[in-house]
Amino acid sequence: MKRLVAYITTGYPDRYFTVDLAMALAEAGVDTLELGIPFSDPVADGPVIETANLRALQQGFRLEHLFEISREIAPAIDTLWMGYFNPFYHLGMERFIREACEAGVNGFIIPDLPFEEAQPYQPMIREAGLGLIDFIAPTDTPERIAMISRGARKFIYLVAYAGITGSGQSEELSDVISRIREATQTPVYLGFGVTPETAKEKAKEVDGVIVGSAFVKVLLDEALSHGNRIATIAQMAREIKEKINE
């Protein structure tokens, strides 16, 4: 069965909402949850997720909130922290690893930490039993694809196009996927631009999809009550999970 990874912005519109939404997504069939760490300059993300990041920060988000929320969520669903390297650097990777282990979080996604620069951190992350998700892009050379793929754990985050999240572009990825398959048996999940409308097509050659902006758009809709936002996002997740497994 193909997997569904869901990204949500931690702490928006509030901490209690994040916990309730995570539980609803687990019930809706989401396999892995990316808890996005709000950051002021989310360079890989488009305007939707950027807006959610800024609103969470304006409402007083702190890293302690991430740790508290995760302790409630991680026992119910496979959880990863998705964030930019600045908070990891300033608080310290050792502290993040310790907090992740105590909460039951299973790893990190750090989109602005290149593969080469991540290597000094890999031993301590792996020794703790956690994963640091590797990215592969359609612009990577065959040699780089093979190098990243060989050491990848948990899953490979295949970027659907060169750009930012939510822009809805597409590129031919068959050759990239074939090269990954030649180098590893680690599952390949496709991210960037996955929506209920595109999920079935985008999932064809991969083992799962990663959905963020489509969910966060609903998260930002202040015309909806908290309950309606949660119900709408959970229903979208059910539909996507069904479509990628048709």
Image (tube, helix red, strand yellow):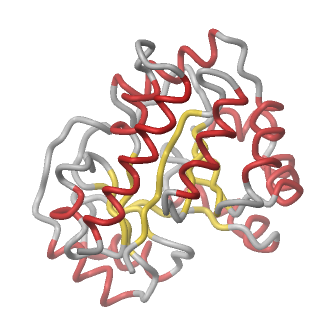
Q: Give the x, y percent position of residue 82.
A: 58, 46
Q: In which quarter of the image is the C terminus?
A: bottom left
Report which quarter residue 227 is drawn in: top right
Residue projecting furthest to the top: 58
- Residue at 77% of width from left, 73% of height from top? 129
Left or right of 70, for residue 17: left
Report which quarter residue 97 is drawn in: bottom right
* Camera-side residue of 159 and 92: 159
Residue 119 drawn above or below residue 44: below
Left or right of 75, for residue 156: left
Residue 45 drawn above or below residue 77: above
* Camera-side residue of 89 and 192: 192
Report which quarter residue 153 is drawn in: bottom right
- Residue at 68% of width from left, 66% of height from top? 122
Q: Quadrant of the N terminus?
A: bottom left
* Camera-side residue of 169 and 238: 238
Q: Give the x, y percent position of residue 141.
A: 25, 67
- Residue at 25% of width from left, 64% of height from top? 243
- Residue at 52% of width from left, 60% of height from top? 116
Left or right of 189, for residue 163: left
